[in-house]
Image (cartoon, helix red, strand yellow):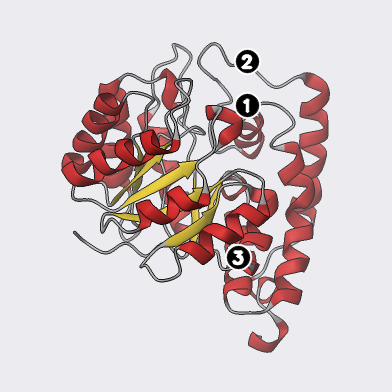
Amino acid sequence: MTQLDLSGVFPAMCTPFDDDERIDFETLQHDAQRLEAAGVDGLVPVGSTGESATLTHDEHVQVVEAVIEAVNDVPVIAGTGSNNTREALELSERAAEAGADGLLLISPYYNKPEQRGFIEHYRAIADAVDVPQIVYNVPSRTGQNIEPETAGELAAHENIVGYKAASGDLGQISEVVERTSEEEFAVLSGDDALTLPVISVGGTGTISVVANIEPERTCAMVGAALDGHYDHARDLHHELGPLCRELFVETNPIPVKEAMQIRGYGPARLRSPLTRLAEEHRDDLEAVLADLEDDAITVASLEPEGNR
């Protein structure tokens, strides 16, 4: 198995659609190149933010292939999770064959397995697919929580190398860090508002929605925190705070796709059953984006004072 460095910022990419709801591959590839040029540490297509639930299996693979083709030096971590172990295994095998550097596997949703079910599910995929894999815990979407003890058991598998934490429970995330400290295992924030706190308890970075819109600021914040420059990281955290709130005022990825369109990065179109952002929320989002644009970004302003 190849190694995968899971330190830093990994945007959870949007999947752009044209007027006929077909995937806009040209815009997708331009977006991947924009994010790579901004300094992100990897890309995560076809996750929840990429509307994976509305894509066919063939579309999944096509998106992964397109992103891999577009970038030069950053790893591509493909979302391949499902509530059906066989389906998740098939998606994982196809993504690995397409050249994905890693896999992000949301925990089985709707079925609500017991903890032993999570262990069997993830181990089955890790045994069969020799690619680094990240367990994704997001109880608000799946209806069930992966307990820290379970995360610790999974971390013992050589192909399970990370944990995307989106429970909103910092105490639980800290316990996952504690239980996996003896393994080569990364804990990544899956909640933009908690990225800085997660790093403070031992997290290594973030799989981020906000980084789609503000990749430079997000990278600067995470980099400062990982280097121990917490005063500077805190300043950037608060700069990003209003945008974090606006990007989750409705179900993700509704607001972030609207922000992508406002910034000129891609269309706001979504596949049903998701709908466009409400007008009153769009006004607030536009105001926050305008405020961020008014704050001129320079390399010097994003670095801690000691590094200037």
Residue 277's place in the image compared with 122, above or below, is above
**Residue situated in front as seen by the camera: 224 or 142:** 142
- The residue beneath circle 1 is 254
Q: Which residue is mark 2?
A: 275
Q: Residues within 10 Å of mark 1 (few under 14, many from 20)?
A: many
Q: Amino acid at mark 1?
A: Ile
- The residue indicated by pointer 3 is 199
x, y percent for residue 10: 48, 53
Q: Amino acid at mark 3?
A: Ile
Q: Kindly identify the amino acid type of the residue bearing the numbered disc 2.
A: Thr
Q: Residues within 10 Å of mark 2 (few under 14, many from 20)?
A: some
Answer left or right for 18 relative to 219: left
Q: Is residue 86 above or below residue 77?
A: above
When asked about the image quadrant of residue 307, the answer is bottom right
Q: Is residue 249 left or right of residue 81?
A: right
Give x and y (percent) for residue 63.
33, 33
**Residue sitting farthest toward the bottom:** 306
Q: Is residue 97 placed above or below 186 in the rendered structure?
A: above
Q: For residue 204, say whether it is visible.
A: no
Does the image show residue 288?
Answer: yes
Q: Residue at x 67, y 77 (%)?
A: 300
- Sequence order check: which comes first, mark 2 or mark 3? 3
Structural distance between the alpha carbons of marks 3 and 1? 27 Å
| Drawn side of residue 39 relative to residue 174, left or right | left
Real-space CA distance between mark 2 and mark 1, rounded to the nearest whole angstrom: 7 Å
- Secondary structure found at label 3: helix
Lower sequence index among marks 2 and 1: 1
Q: Provide residue 22's location: percent of width, then percent of height.
A: 39, 17
In the displayed structure, would residue 82 be above or below residue 9? above
Pointers 2 and 1 in contact (CB under 8 A)? Answer: yes
